Amino acid sequence: MSIPLLRLLNANIRQQTSRCGSYKVTCAKVCAHANSRRCLLSNSSAADVSLDALYRIFTIPEAPDSTLGRIERHLSENLAGFLSDHIVAKEKPLHEIEEDFADSEIPEQPTFVSEHTDELLNKLVAHSVHTASPRFIGHMTSALPYFLLPLAKLMVGLNQNLVKIETSKAFTPLERQVLGMMHHLVYGEQEKFYQHWMHSAEHSLGAFCSGGTVANITALWVARNKLFAAQPGFAGVATEGLAAGLQHYGYKKACVMVSERGHYSLSKAADVLGIGRANLVAIATDKNNRMDIEALRKGCQQIADEGGRVMALVGIAGTTETGHIDPLEKMADVAAEIGAHFHVDAAWGGATLLSSTHRGLLQGIERADSVTIDAHKQMYVPMGAGMVLFRDPALVHAIEHHAEYVIRRGSKDLGSHTMEGSRPGMAMLVYSALHVMGRRGYQLLIDQSIDKAQAFSALIHQQPDFEVVTEPELCLLTYRYVPADIKEVLANANEEQMNRITPILNQLTKHVQKSQRESGNAFVSRTKLTPHQYFHQPSTVFRTVLANPLTTMQMLSEILEEQREIGENAPHTLHALYAEARDCGLLSG
Ligand SMILES: *Cc1c(COP(=O)(O)O)cnc(C)c1O
């Protein structure tokens, strides 16, 4: 009790002695415990909330030497330095952090901005995740280029609302242009096409949204409304609902097909659209984690036999777990044959289209009816920049919505074609990133990520005690640690032996991953796969995404070194591993 109070007092004293335009309203807690001199500064004994102070937080910026002023300077001069200075490397247990966020009451009394900022630094920033670190290679979130920080501040300062022109003006044409540029990247239509459609009130080349989840939902929303369109005697699913739609068209169910590597956002989509999660059908993958086309055909046939209707096929361009790309061209063929909507979830992998070296990997994406791309993944833009693109600019008619006071018929308001309402001007950051880095800049970034993933894979192959589980097709790969002598005999293990060893190796992988994360030196993530080479046993693996351009091979080598050290020092698990290996005849004696 006494330490936080002391800090509070110190912060207040510092505050009052510094030149400051901040929110000077003295805290009642301080008044209660400290001498009365401090209370004088609040200018009154009871009314410690003053309109005057409130006016000031709207009009006067924080002084340069205030806590916030110093933070701003530090952030703009040296973001990386700021993050490494303020984020604590060693992990604090979540339950301890929760104690810092346990108060359910809204504070009655205002707080000085600087005092509050100090609190944020200690409680929040210190225990956030250093996603920009070049050793943070476990997830799709990575470093941002510096110029986006002040631009993000500008965006927040302008506080435009993209739902309608009346609150966004130039931001609306900008967003339409960004969608046009991304549409062009995917579909490569002629200039005439974009001149005609890009700014057309009744059409949209896509929809900007908070992320891949909303993009996928929007795409399947379009597919659903298109399939259950209005006809004589039926006003359409948007009006009458899915039950009436199924009945009108005589389908028992509507299904969406995706490989077993499909992102969970699709299951949310099936849920909110009334399709039902059970009708999101997971199709088996081949040994390279790509949709098995024969299994897809069989699945579609089965649904037809059951009186159902395939509403959409979803191809994945860069699966979340292994980074692989489905055979999009072949899926497009199947979709055409059965008359289903073809959607490509390229939330993560779509940025590969910016590289002429590698865009061929996504061959067939241009035949998709809709495509999801997240700019906040491989396009190095802050979170909240998802997009869905539509090959046919009239597709959005299926989800069009109008109201009287905004998004009126004939207006160019973007809100008539988006699921979300009020939306920030994130498109500006995508626009800036595309201009500042240019396609060729992106190509360099993407190419070096893929090269690095291949080099990392080669490095892992050289280790006697690590094995690559899935090779990188883009910049994502999975691997695991296996003590050298076990690895050697495991290569010839039969199914039963593999079944017995795998759960212990899973424990080991999990232990190494957790310990490494807790040490705070580096972070790789983990997931569970069913690799064909391990007889489809559920196997825990390390997962790395090598998108940060500042990650070096030296760092990757050190990450392996640390993992090896942790693995070698897990006597309990190793003991169990060797005992089991002897017991099932993999090792003699
Ligand atoms: C990240 C991702 C999503 C979800 O996107 P959010 O931006 O997290 O909503 C969907 N699909 C794939 C393949 C992804 O990688």
Image: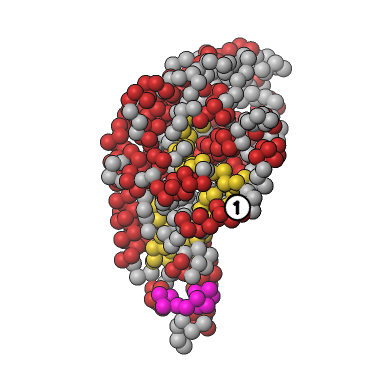
Question: In the image shown, does 319 or 426 lie closer to the viewer?
Answer: 319
Q: Residue placed at 44% from the left, 46% from the top?
A: 332
**Residue 497 locus on image (x, y percent):** 50, 78
The part of the image, by quadrant, that contains residue 290 is bottom left
Q: How many numbered markers are drawn?
A: 1
- Magenta segment includes 495: yes
Q: Label 1 sits on what residue type?
A: Ile
The part of the image, by quadrant, that contains residue 185 is top left
Does label 1 point to a residue whose CB lies under 8 Å from ligand 1? no
**Residue 382 locus on image (x, y percent):** 45, 34
Question: In the image shown, does 110 or 434 lie closer to the viewer?
Answer: 434
**Residue 415 locus on image (x, y percent):** 55, 23
Q: Residue placed at 36% from the left, 45% from the top?
A: 363
Q: Residue furthest bottom?
A: 589
| The N terminus sits in image quarter | top right
From the viewer's perspective, is residue 543 above or below residue 377?
Answer: below
From the viewer's perspective, is residue 336 above or below residue 514?
Answer: above
Q: Residue placed at 52% from the left, 43% from the top?
A: 340
Q: Residue placed at 43% from the left, 66% from the top?
A: 481
**Residue 164 locus on image (x, y percent):** 53, 18
- Mark 1 element type: helix
Task: Inspect this view and state whether residue 300 appears.
Answer: yes
The part of the image, by quadrant, that contains residue 389 is top left
- Magenta segment includes 73: no
Q: What residue is disc 1 on?
A: 303
Q: Residue furthest front?
A: 232
Q: Main secondary structure of the magenta part?
A: helix
Left or right placement of residue 146 versus residue 3 in this view: left
Question: In the image shown, does 75 or 551 lie closer to the viewer?
Answer: 551
The magenta-colored residue range is 490-501
Left or right placement of residue 354 versus residue 305 in this view: left
Left or right placement of residue 73 versus residue 282 in this view: left
